[in-house]
């Protein structure tokens, strides 16, 4: 009788494999690779008194990335100068992470005030960001000067792009 139960249990175990089913789960994850800036327009007042114009919190850059190893590039249409026809006012920007404990920035070429170029100045990253992204303060500076600027309206366009390496 013992042999019968042993054969019955072995038979049930062997045959239960024939009744098994499998599910293969495949998930497609969307890529997130984006930069946003707020505000998108920076009105700057220059009193024309020779003093530097410094605003360490002119704007906020938010970087979101589902990838590691990417670069954010800042490009100035006028090579780091506000332009009014043939007149120009040089300026500089800096970009500093608001979370000083985050270690996702590999190289920040904008950690101090730097003149932007038409070729671009980069920040390299080596970590993904949290879902809400990482924020960076964007500072703006017009260095002190000894000659008056010609009055009028000066403009430049800064383009910020993100690229996966």
Image: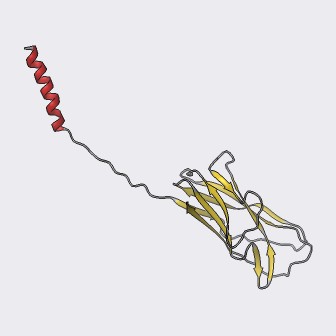
The image's colouring method is: secondary structure
Residue nearest the viewer, comparing 165 with 2? 165
> Is residue 121 found left or right of 149 in the rendered image?
left
Q: Point out the residue furthest to the right here.
A: 146
Quarter of the view holding residue 79: bottom right
Residue nearest the viewer, comparing 48 with 87? 87
Quadrant of the image for the C terminus? bottom right
Q: Percent x, y for residue 35?
A: 59, 62
The residue under the point 66% across, 62% down is: 122
Quadrant of the image for the N terminus? top left
Residue nearest the viewer, comparing 106 with 153? 106
The residue under the point 86% across, 72% down is: 47
Q: Percent x, y for residue 75?
A: 67, 70
The residue under the point 61% across, 58% down is: 62
Q: Percent x, y for residue 128?
A: 55, 51
Quarter of the view holding residue 92: bottom right
Q: Is residue 165 above or below residue 85?
A: above
Q: Point out the residue furthest to the front here.
A: 165
> Is residue 148 found left or right of 163 in the rendered image?
right
Q: Point out the residue furthest to the bottom here.
A: 85
> Is residue 44 found left or right of 100 in the rendered image?
right
Q: Percent x, y for residue 84?
A: 77, 82
Q: Is residue 37 above or below residue 66?
A: below
Number of labelled discs? 0
The residue under the point 81% across, 75% down is: 89
């Amino acid at each position: 009788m013992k042999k019968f139960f042993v054969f019955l249990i072995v038979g049930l175990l062997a045959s239960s494999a024939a009744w098994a089913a499998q599910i293969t789960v495949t998930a497609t994850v969307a890529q997130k690779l984006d930069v946003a800036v707020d505000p998108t327009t920076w009105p700057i007042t220059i009193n024309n008194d020779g003093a530097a114009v410094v605003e360490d919190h002119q704007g906020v850059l938010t970087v979101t990335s589902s990838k590691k190893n990417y670069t954010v590039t800042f490009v100035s249409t006028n090579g780091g100068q506000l332009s009014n026809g043939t007149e120009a006012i040089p300026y500089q920007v800096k970009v500093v992470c608001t979370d000083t404990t985050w270690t996702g920035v590999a190289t920040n070429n904008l950690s101090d005030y730097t003149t932007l170029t038409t070729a671009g100045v980069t920040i390299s990253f080596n970590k993904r960001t949290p879902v809400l992204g990482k924020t960076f303060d964007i500072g703006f500076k017009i260095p002190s000067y000894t000659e008056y600027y010609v009055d009028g309206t000066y403009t430049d366009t800064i383009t910020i792009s993100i690229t996966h390496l």
